[in-house]
Image (tube, rainbow, N blue to C red):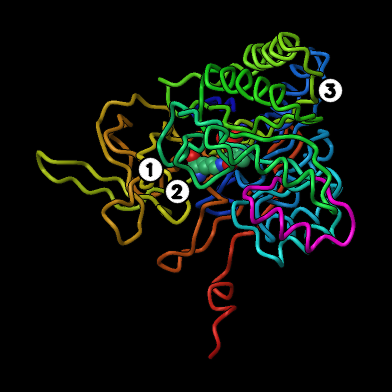
Amino acid sequence: MTLTYTNGELTLHGHKLTDIAKKYGTPLFVYDEVMIRNQCRRFHTALKESGLSYTISYASKAFSAIQLFNLMTEEKMGLDVVSEGELYTALQSSVSPDTIHFHGNNKTDREIRYAIESGVEYFVIDSLSEIERLDELATKKVKALLRINPGVEAHTHEFIQTGQEDSKFGLSIQKGLALEGVRKIEKAKNIEFMGVHFHIGSQIFESTGTVATIEQVITWLSDNHIQAQVLNIGGGFGIKYTDEDVSYPIEEGIKIITDTLKSACHAVGYPVPAISLEPGRSIVGEAGVTLYEVGTVKEIPDTNYYVSIDGGMSDHIRTALYGATYELLLANREEEHDKLMTVAGKLCESGDIIRRDIKLPSSIHRGDLLVVLSTGAYHYSMSSNYNQMLKPAVVFVTPEEVRLVVKRQTLEHLIAQDIR
Ligand code: LLP
């Protein structure tokens, strides 16, 4: 997202962040709609370039909202959902059910029934027992991919690695479970085998792991005479959180991936399957920021300088959970970043930190507006009501307008489920 200082104030598409904060309150998630659309288009262009048949499904776990899903329809993106809740939200939008696929390592019977009734495009089966359950619950033929585990360790945080041998996701190629799964699906009377899926991890910056996995999977498919119409390679394309990061090079990376798929297939005479992608973070991550108002400023002599904001781990859990790092900017003044400080949340935990040891203007004081960059993915969707904090509002910004997309929760929401 391109935020620019205009007359000393940060603006997005010409709208002052201070005006947006004044109108919608803080904490507030602000998205650059133009950038979201552009990220979708970059994937489309790169895949079109390959000449392969393809689909792209936005991984809705990164941020689920009806208006975002409507936008995904406009950008010809399908959806990847992993729960009844994500499917329900998707069905309230303009997304067509036959462009939605259903993931999950423990789909409940209720979820399976709901997804079948809704007419989702396909299931991504994640275990041997799921094959039997799906076959039993299906009242008509349903399509499915099998999630396989290639045994590849992606270079990322261990909590978001998913392709290693010891993983709750997918069926291991090495241990023979993947092949057993395919044979089982082929015998099932109500399941049509469409192909295979893998996702080796999230926040990955280079294509080596994916390339190695594609080569391995194509050889495996060919050796075992398995006809896959679709190869879904998941998501995981990394984004830039700090100045040290470089986002995944979408155009270059997709070219490497699609060239690999073609050459791996040609090498063994295997018909090239359609390729499917499930990007989440790379679609919305850098397109979103969080606005917070500064409250208490506390200096502990020779120790630390704490600046506390009006949100925290209830809307920003990634620092506490993964040790993630963020860039921050002062929105209402352009000043030199001359003082080392820690920006903390307001929740009752010492671990409730937005960013440790960051240089920001020494003049920061109560009432200032701070922006945390690259919070568009896995922030709102991982927000909670811990400490009975309210989930923030979400707005989308274009050059023409600032539009409310999700309302801020109210105190009534906090007790809506309580029985008095
Ligand atoms: N497909 C599958 C099967 C996945 O498990 C995921 C992410 C994606 C696609 C989308 O990955 P993306 O393109 O967004 O990297 N909460 C963590 C991320 C967990 C990712 C889980 N699966 C975080 O905040 O970093």
Query: Can you tell me whether the CB of the residue at mark 1 lies under 8 Å from the nearest atom of ligand 1?
Result: no
Q: Which mark is residue 53?
A: 3
Q: How many angstroms separate mark 1 from mark 2 (CA)? A: 7 Å
Q: Give the percent coordinates (x, y) of residue 134.
A: 75, 57
Residue 16 visible in the picture: no
Q: Give the percent coordinates (x, y) of residue 145.
A: 74, 41
Residue named by callout 2: 316
Instruction: Give the mark toward the camera: 3 or 1.
Output: 3
Looking at the rendering, the stretch of residues picked out in magenta corresponds to: 124-143
User: Pointer 3 and pointer 2: residues touching (CB < 8 Å)?
Assistant: no
Q: Give the percent coordinates (x, y) of residue 151.
A: 50, 31
Q: How many angstroms separate mark 3 from mark 2 (CA)? A: 38 Å
Q: Residues within 10 Å of mark 3 (few under 14, many from 20)?
A: few
**Amino acid found under the numbered disc labelled 2:** His
Identify the residue at horizontal 80%, vertical 37% (top origin).
Answer: 194
Q: Which mark is residue 319?
A: 1
State which tag comes first along the sequence, 3 or 1: 3
> In what element is the residue under mark 3?
loop
Residue 107 visible in the picture: yes
